[in-house]
Structures are given as structure tokens and as C-alpha cells.
Image: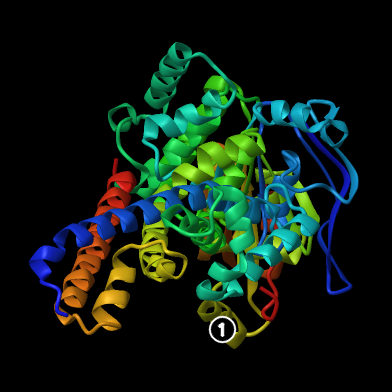
Amino acid sequence: MIEFEGISKIYEHNGNELRAVDQVDLTVNKGEIFGVIGYSGAGKSTLVRLVNLLEYPSEGRLLVDGEDLTQLSKPELRKVRKRIGMIFQHFNLLESKTVRHNVAFPLAISGVPKKEIDSRVEEILEFVGLSDKARQYPDQLSGGQKQRVGIARALATSPDILLCDEATSALDPETTKSILKLLRRVRDEYNITILMITHEMNVVREVCDRIAVMEHGRVIEQGSIFDLFSQPEHPTTKNFVRTVMENEIPASILEGIEKRGASRHIYRVTFVDESAGQPVLSHVSKSYEVEVNVLFGQITELQGIPFGHLVVELQGEDKEIMRAIDSIQRSVTVQEVKAHAG
Amino acid sequence: MQVKLMDFWPRILEATNQTLLMVGISLLAATLIGLPLGIALVVTKNGGLLENKPIFNALSSVVNFFRSIPFIILLVAILPVTRFIVGSSIGTAAAVVPLVIFSAPYIARLVESSLLEVKPGVIEAAEAMGATPWQIIARVYIPEALSSIVLNLTIATIGLVGASAMAGFVGGGGLGDLAISYGYQRFETDIMIATVLLLVVIVQLTQTIGNFVSKKIRRQ
């Protein structure tokens, strides 16, 4: 649906080259919710603006639904833009117009007859749950309601794609959740492809199917939510994962491990999918001469799949422990934790 | 030879009429020139909707040039132009031409600053929706900035009231002229006070109406 092929955006600043987006290759599939995550200044805002050509790429090809937008004339581009909705961090609503007129705006500029506009606006306001606010002005609404108006406005022209530029970054966690739920409904009920950029890992975890991590204009890692959360490779990805999942062993526990020296047998056991439901550890302690002591752990859910890890200490004779580990490894991943590593 | 204030009322009334006429017509004409000029400044600006450096620089220089000429000099300097436009270089109508040339560039700058208050994100959103530059001007810039434009036009109107006082130089008449020629130069203190009071009332009324209309627009 959206294909970035070697896309770069280069700014000239006092003779210096700034590569805001650097050689990005990405494909967003139809009907997918794709998240791009990165710290501020990573180039994600520029990236999302390339899709509807609010920014022109300096290099590379960008295809939307197989069509290279850079080849279009201005009127043709405006037509395509009506098929690409966009919502913003600060909502960008017309303050001088009511909710109804804000939602009607994209239809009115396309010359849709008034009757059709009225019924479409009513329908879409119903969808976002703001039918009773139609006659209010944006400054009478809460942040979450404003973003709902933003979403309604973006959907008014029945687009194929919805671009979300930090759409929840100005909202509190509770409101963020309700907006994300709404975005999921947008995808599920209208089959709209969603490309969202954010710096919040909990946002992508909540709704995205796949994500890409950006740093210094480059995509440093991409994959399904599950893969990136369970096996982050790049340090930046790991940092992001850590913001929502405590992956590292807390310092106080590490300290305790260090004190008692290398004689201890500490392992990180990672559960994925159905293994999370199996009594692996209790089975081991019953079958072998070992005691299992859980030091630390977390179980969570990613895209409906249970995922988690436990840091455990196995106490007993070395030989028994080795056999126990062998047995555990058959169903889950086990890594030895060294005192200084973590 | 003292002039009785009571006998002088018809003159004051006539002068009030002249002031309102000069200010009203100048405001209308200056807005008709200044509004598009202000819009042009904003859209041709660096990063604007229709970014165009040569046009922006040319417009900006012309505006600055006319804004730097003191009104009293402008009044005399453009006498030939005035004569060409209104057929005469003296009288109330003749005073309107320099007033327009004086305030149109000022209004252009005021409109420019009002339009620049519109959040760039709102303009970007309209662009993302596929709006044409003209649609963005007519349906986003102007309605979003209208309340601020009205306030700024109020400022321009009051400036015009002040400038119109100098219209006496070209026989334009008006309250300011009356205050100067009778009150100040002939020491008719009560006439001076009466005319100045009238000017105070006009300015107060203008500001009050401006505030009211601007507020009405903001919260329709």
C-alpha cells in the first residue's frame, strides 16, 4: 500500500547537509497498522509527511497503491491527498468553525453537495462518538474529543490510508487508550491502512501489527511487534522495549547475585506463546533434585500472545542442575545470567 | 473676535461629517488594497503557500518605502497623483488619496501579522486534505484570522482619524483641521476642546465597536 524505496530527505542548512530521512526502505501492507517509533529528531515526522508529499523526497521512490506520487501534477496530487487522511499531535482543527464544519471541511473543498455532506458528517460523528458535540467549537472540547474530531475529519472523504503524526502524544494515558481503540476500529471496520509515528512504546504495543525503529533518519530495525519486543537487537530498540517491559534485572537483585559469587546458578527463562501456560519450572523441581527460586520476572501479552521471562536461581548439585536445564530447554529458551552481565 | 461655541455647531457638525467621510472612504479603499497585499506577503513568504522570493521582496520593499514617508510629506508629495485621480488637489476627496496611500501599506502589515497568527499546523492540515492555495486562503487563513484582522483594522481606523487631522493642509477639512485652525491658531479654546472631545468620542466608539465585532466573530 505504501512503499518507500531508498527514500531520503536531505535539508541544506548553511552549506551543511542534514539527512532527516536516510535511505529508508519500508513497505506498509494494506489493512495493516504500522508503527514507526523513534526519539524526537529521529526523522519520523519527516517520514510520515513524505507519504502525502507534504515533504518531497530528495532521493528514492515512494509508491502509494503502486503509484509514484512525485510524478503527479499538483491537481492530481490534491486528488490523491483526499484518499490519504492525516491526524496530528495538536489536532490542527479550525478554531473558527464548529465540530460539524470541521468534519465537513474536506468534503466542502471537494465540492460534495450539501445534503451528502450533512449525512456523511452525521454518520462519521456517530462513528467517533461525538454526535452530541456537532455544534460546539474546538475550544469547548477536551483533548481526546478534539482528536476524535481530527479522526472524523480525516475519515470524512473515506480514505484508504490514515497517517497519524504523534496522534496521542498530547493526551493522557487513559485518553490515549480510547483513541487507540478508536484507531483499531477504523482499521477493522473500514479496512484503512494506518501508518503511525510515535515515541511511545506502549502506543505501538497497543495497536500496531508491525513496527520500524528509526534513529538518525535510518530505519535500524523492523519486524512484527512480537519479534521486536521479544528479541530486540539494536540498543535503541532495547531501550524502547525497556520503557514498557522491565527486561533487565533490577540493580538490587544483581547486587545480591554478585555478593554470593559465581557458585550460584542463575538463568533467564523466556516464555513465548503456549509455553507461558506450562508449568515448566514446577515440573523441573519435581523431576530433578533442584530447588527453583524465582528472583525476578514479568509476563505480558503482545498481540494476544503471552510473552514473558523469569530470572530464576537453581539450587542443587551441578549435575542435577545441568539435567534440569536440559529439560527446561526443550520447551523454553534459557540463558545463563552471569553475575556481572544481567 | 470671539466665536460663540453655540453658533459654531453647524461648522463642527460639518467637520465631523468630513472626518467620518475621509476616514470611512480611506479605510474602505485602504483595506481593499491592504488585505490582498497582506495575504500576498504571507503566502509568498519563505515557507509560504506560494513561496516566491522575488515577489515577496518586491512587495515588502514597496510597503516599507511608503510606510517610511511621514504623512505630512506624503500629502504634499503626491499632489499630482491626487489631482490625476480625483481631478482636484484640494478638498475632502483630495485628502482621501494620501490617506489611502498612507494606510494601505500599514493595513497590509497588520493583515500579515494577523494571518501569521494562524497556526502553521492548521494550514498543513488543509494542504494534507488536498485544498488548493486559494481554498486555504479563503476558507482557512481569512476565517481563522478574521477576529484578529478586525482588531487590527480598528487600530488602522484610529490611525486614520489621527492622520486625517492633517488633511487641512489640502483643504480637506474635518475635526482635526477645525481644532488646529480655530482652536489652536486663533486661541478659541472652547472650540478646540469641543472638537478634541468629539475626536475622543469617535476613537472610543471605534475601539468599542471593533472589540465587540472581533469578539462576536471569535465566538459566533
Q: Which residue is situated farthest in the front direction here?
A: B1
| Quadrant in the picture for residue A61 | top right
The total of numbered circles placed on residues is 1
Relative vertical location of residue B43 with respect to residue B8 in this rendering, above or below: above
Relative vertical location of residue A9 with respect to residue A266 in this rendering, above or below: above
Q: What residue sits 64% from the left and 28% below the top?
A: A82
> How was this image coloured?
rainbow
Q: Is residue B209 left or right of residue B96?
A: left
Residue type beneath disc 1: Glu
Q: In this orientation, does residue A93 appear?
A: no
| Image quadrant in which the C terminus of chain B is located | top left
Q: What residue sits 64% from the left and 85% below the top?
A: A261
- Could you tell me residue A332's position as x and y percent? 67, 48
- Could you tell me residue B180's position as x and y percent? 31, 77
Q: Is residue A190 left or right of residue A216?
A: left
What residue sits right under mark 1 in the picture?
A255
For the residue pair A18 and A254, the one nearer the viewer reads as: A18
SS category of the residue bearing label 1: helix
| Quadrant in the picture for residue A291 | bottom right
Q: What residue sits 45% from the left and 42% below the top?
A: B143
